[in-house]
Image (tube, rainbow, N blue to C red):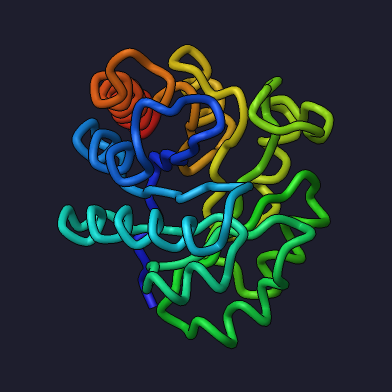
Amino acid sequence: MNKRIGRFHVLTDLRFQQRFSHAELACLAAQGGADTIQFRQKSGSVRNMLAEAKRAASVCRDRGVPFLVNDRLDVALACRADGIHLGQQDFPVREARRILGPEAIIGGTVTTVEEVLAMQEAGADYVGFGPVFPTTSKDNPAPVKGVTNLAQVCKAVRIPVIAIAGISLERIGPVIRAGAHGVAVMTGVTTAENPARAARAFREELDAVITGYSD
């Protein structure tokens, strides 16, 4: 099965900004060229989370952009998401595949070669590796891995690797040249004055780097 694994994932989140809802951020990011939207909400009631996720999922369906839910298998099921992104302490990938089925996009966060190989074996379609660079979006982030470790992971697996954490415009080139399939961005888009314009800048830089690297 040939699944569409995006190169530019944008995570929606309300922790660092409250100007826009998840659905509004999904719309703005898609306007700017995001080809995967990840719904990320770490707090609040399940009812609120589900309502927000359903609205964001609807936006993504209208625009033909894959919609993934971060961590929450129940929310992913209830809002008919295209898939889920799981952390090391979240629902096991193998069980998520059994529940969501073969067509669902399932990704997972990894920090080591051993973890990425285990994710691949469990049936993940892609992995998010990081933190490649320092990040403030997590309370207790893992130690920074850097581009060298990213390159090692990319060489070790068959599935796409998405570089996560601390991704800025000037860091897109190094991570793609290290072998990453794409990048995941949150605050670089969501806290920008104009999220759609910020997403467009990331998209254009990513496309330029990929084109130049493949020539």
Residue closer to the observer: 115 or 58: 58
Residue occupying the point 49% across, 38% down: 13
Q: Quadrant of the N terminus?
A: bottom left
Where residue 112 appears, as percent x and y from the top left, is 80, 46
Nearer-the-camera pick, 119 or 66: 66
Image location of residue 129, percent across then percent down: 66, 43
On the image, the x and y values in percent for residue 51 come to 39, 60
Q: Tell me: 198 left or right of 120.
A: left
Q: Residue at x 46, y 50 (%)?
A: 39
In the rendered image of this protein, does residue 210 appear above or below residue 174? below
Left or right, residue 95 beside residue 203: right
User: What residue lies at 47% left-to-right and 25% top-to-bottom?
Assistant: 17
Residue drawn at (29%, 35%) of the image: 29
The location of residue 175, given as percent across then percent down, is: 55, 28
Q: Quadrant of residue 197?
A: top left
Farthest left residue in view? 62
Q: Is residue 193 above or below residue 97?
A: above
Q: Nearest the camera: 144 or 157?
A: 144
User: How many marks on residues?
Assistant: 0
Horizontal side, residue 90 vs residue 210: left or right: right
Q: Nearer the viewer, residue 125 or 86?
A: 86
The correct choice, above or below, for 120 with respect to 202 in the image is below
Can you say which quadrant of the picture contains the C terminus? top left
